[in-house]
Image (spheres, helix red, strand yellow):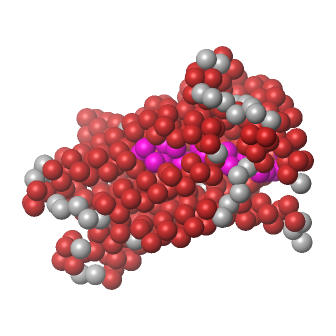
Amino acid sequence: MPNVRERAMSTIVFSSSVGTILEYYDFFIYVTLMPILAKLFFPATDPSSAAFISAAGFGAAFLARPVGTLIFSPMADRIGRKKTFIVTLSLMGLATTLMGCLPGFQSVGLAAPAALLALRIAQGLALGGEYGSAAVYVMEHSPAGKRGLFTSALQGTAGLGLLAAIVIVTALKFGLDAQAYESWGWRVPFLMSAPIVVVAAAIRLKMSETPVFLHLQRNGKLPKSPLLDTLRSGQAWKGILLAIFGAQGGTSVSLYASIVYMLFFMQNVLKVDPTTTNVCVGIAVIVAFPFYLVFGALSDRWGRAKTMLTGIVLWMLSAYPAFAGIRSGAAQGAWAQVTAYIGVLAILTAMIMAPLPAFVSECFPPQTRATGFGLAQQLGNVLFGGFLPLISLSLVSWSGNPLAGVAYSIASLFPCAIVTYLWAIKAEKSFRSKGEDVVARALETAR
């Protein structure tokens, strides 16, 4: 039977995850609906050109995420983790709902893609502040020996958000005829965000602030300018650079190659219909989700950096054969084979991703933890993940080789493997020990 502390942690993880799943659902709806959005919102008549424009729109939202971090992450360090991720949740929900109300290109011309891009940027701002605050919130409630386990559950929400988007879009495509889907059905996933946001916000309003933040607040140790404190700290920059070029870079490449670029690859390179693509990727996401908990728990015993390094190396070795197998399976209509290969990459992605929030959180002192986490994560996302689909598609088009895109992903992981091996494993112990005393005292006071 779980003890009182474990039951409380389950509630904390669930409450945090509800909002984070919703935010990733909102963010990934654009990805899932790219074929119809490209047709309705962009002037390009050539499907290949529309795919490139859609991929660029996906990347543009990533440019906004560091800006969102600069706005919201210092807020989490100054006024609290809980208040901040209620604000980001509301912003994301509003932007997504408005997307469902936009007129198309035929109605308002270039104002349509401009408005869509503006709302994508708003989504990027919200997500830039959301995830760091939520991850720090869970980490600062977790006991020392289980931080990897509890924060890994939150890390898996990216896949669950995408899965929710895939399920809803696929159900609408099956349930509506083509005319109804193109006329109004595509708006439903966006508009569904509004009532769900209300429920998620109500859940988060009932949550308590972290014991670590309350400990700092009681002792007058909250920073006046967490952003400046972070930027002026050599230790913070060490953590940021280790995360960007190590763990976060590895996470960004593996996630966006295995899941997001996979959608582009199957639909635009292999010419697989969107519904079949969504089903294959959706099943793979379901299969991979329990492994986040497995690898998160493993990182508590074996070490965060060692677990992530193993995942990075295995992903690099598996990616090219997997994409080649997906290409072969799609040509033969062997969808079980396709799904299995995607599942392998998704599981290895979980091995890289699961320890990340605990690892990055432990790189920074409690006073500026949300700010440091946010900067490391979002700069890593921009450098390694945001434009990966666009670059990969461009390489395929330029070279004529359908597998050129995955070669770029493999090459991108080399610096991540080197940095993790040479520096992250050694740095992990010192980072964890420096923040341990404050966390332990705060949790003891809370009890």
Note whether 351 is above or below 67 in the view shown.
Answer: below
Q: Residue at x 19, y 73 (%)?
A: 183
Note whether 377 is above or below 288 in the view shown.
Answer: above
Residue 187 included in the magenta stretch of the image: no
- Front residue (pair 76, 59): 76
In the picture provided, is 267 more to the left or to the right than 413? left
Provide residue 117's location: percent of width, then percent of height.
27, 47
Report the quarter where the C terminus lies.
Answer: bottom right
Dividing the picture into quadrants, the one containing residue 274 is bottom left
Provide residue 341's location: percent of width, then percent of height.
52, 57
Dividing the picture into quadrants, the one containing residue 358 is top right
Magenta stretch mostly in which secondary structure? Answer: helix
Q: Which residues lie in the magenta part?
A: 124-147
In the picture provided, is 390 more to the left or to the right than 209? left
Residue 144 included in the magenta stretch of the image: yes
* Residue 363 visible in this rendered orientation of the protein: no
Q: Residue at x 76, y 33 (%)?
A: 220
Report the quarter where the N terminus lies.
Answer: bottom right
Provide residue 179's location: percent of width, then percent of height.
18, 77
Provide residue 336's location: percent of width, then percent of height.
49, 68
Q: Residue at x 33, y 83 (%)?
A: 175
* Residue 86 visible in this rendered orientation of the protein: yes
Instruction: Give the total of numbered labels.
Output: 0
In the picture provided, is 264 more to the left or to the right than 282? left
Q: Residue at x 70, y 28 (%)?
A: 424
- Front residue (pair 152, 226): 226
- Front residue (pair 341, 267): 267
In the picture provided, is 356 more to the left or to the right than 439? left
- Front residue (pair 197, 289): 197
